[in-house]
Image: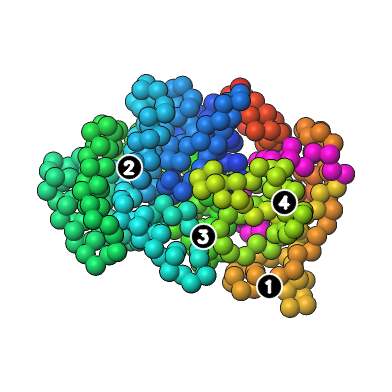
Amino acid sequence: MRHICVVGLNWGDEGKGKIVDVLSSGVDVVVRYQGGANAGHTVYIGDVKKVLHHLPMGILHEGVAAVLGNGMVIEPRGLLEEVATIPESAIERLFLSDRAHVVLPHHTALDRSREEDRNGKKIGTTLRGIGPAYQDKSARRGVRLGDLVRPGFIEDKLPKKLAERCDGLDVTSGVIEESVELCRQVRDRLGAQITDTQVLLADRHAAGERFLFEGAQGCLLDLDFGTYPFVTSSSPSFLGVGPGTGFSPRKIDHVVGVTKVYCTRVGEGPFPSELRGEEEESLRAAGNEYGATTGRPRRVGWLDIPALRHAVLLNDLDSFALTKADVLDGRDTIPVTVGYRLDGREIHHFPTHVDDLSRVEPIVEEWPGWGTIDEHTVRPFADKLEEATGIPVSILSTGKRRDETVLLTPFDGYVGAVR
């Protein structure tokens, strides 16, 4: 395999950061293709915790280039704070698409005011300005990273552009000056890293280099194929790679889908297998299920096979990476939602409309559990998952650290030593 894509199969928080980090040991370039600072990818190197929001996990590996694709929206202050946490030598390996859009303070203010005005019908956004920034992109009034390095843009054109955009908006005074200063800081610190990443990827592909593509969130939050309207503003699924990078998905050899051995969700929207009461609290505590970006407690439930089948189809999936398996250590059996009842009928597909999805009753089976998780004890569970979806398990995460990872199937030399 030469190029791989890692996607989340649920509502985000599946542990993609760790899987990307492990796979990055065998690649030349890691490419992020959508989302922004609403992502929170976590990895433990030994006992040291590292959380990144914009930067791909590959930046933590010596010699691996990291690309922020055109499908992303970049928040200047957050990006600069992340860059300050990596070695200066790593910045030379960082490349920012000149087509990626910029999240500015008025976007964050809009995001927050809209959530507050929804009268109990919140979407559950991270309040990082992601949706409004994508709206400006679609409305052809956004600011792109490439604009920031154009002569005179920040000093002359940006204040006028922002004045027009902010006219009539409920934003605080000084927001235009703050935006201009943030953009100036990005230009001065990272202007040399802003480039045409479509051409960069084409050149590196022609040179024989290996790529790893990663998205943010999960495909059940996909703008088109997720639980609309409780979705994100872009396409976290494999379908987002092309428009998010300018690189043809036809060249990608393997799609790895990441899922926990149970499910979580942050924010609003239907969640068919969601737990309540003591069972909910127990699973949340065992898995330490709190958002890396927001700190919000995650909603928890059992693994959902109809939802996974939907994700398998959407992503043309090749294999699963199972995470958080150690959280369910010691269980003889593990509950799994294998279907739904809707209006008295048994169904095994994932309903398109949220009203139907909100009304389904889960059909639960008990699947084989394990004592202490390893590649042998998990095999009966993995076999049941493959039987239910047609997709094998290739990677097993047995703990939070980078070295607590087992490769169940070979990746043809693609993956270096797990360390």
Determine the residue positioned at 56% across, 58% down.
Answer: 267
Q: Pointer 3: what residue?
A: 124
Q: CA distance from mark 4 to mark 2?
A: 37 Å
Residue bearing mark 1: 359
Specify whether residue 198 is in view: no
Task: Name the amino acid, label 3.
Answer: Gly
Residue at mark 2: 76
The kind of residue on which mark 2 rests is: Pro
Q: CA distance from mark 1 to mark 3?
A: 20 Å
| Labels 4, 1: front one | 4
Residue 416 vertical placement versus 307 (above, below): above
Q: Which mark is residue 281?
A: 4
First in residue order: circle 4 vs circle 1: 4
The magenta stretch is: 307-332
In primary-sequence order, the first of circles 1 and 3 is 3
- Which secondary structure, mark 3? loop
Q: Secondary structure at mark 1?
A: helix
Q: Image quadrant for the C terminus? A: top right
Q: Residue 173, can we see it?
A: yes
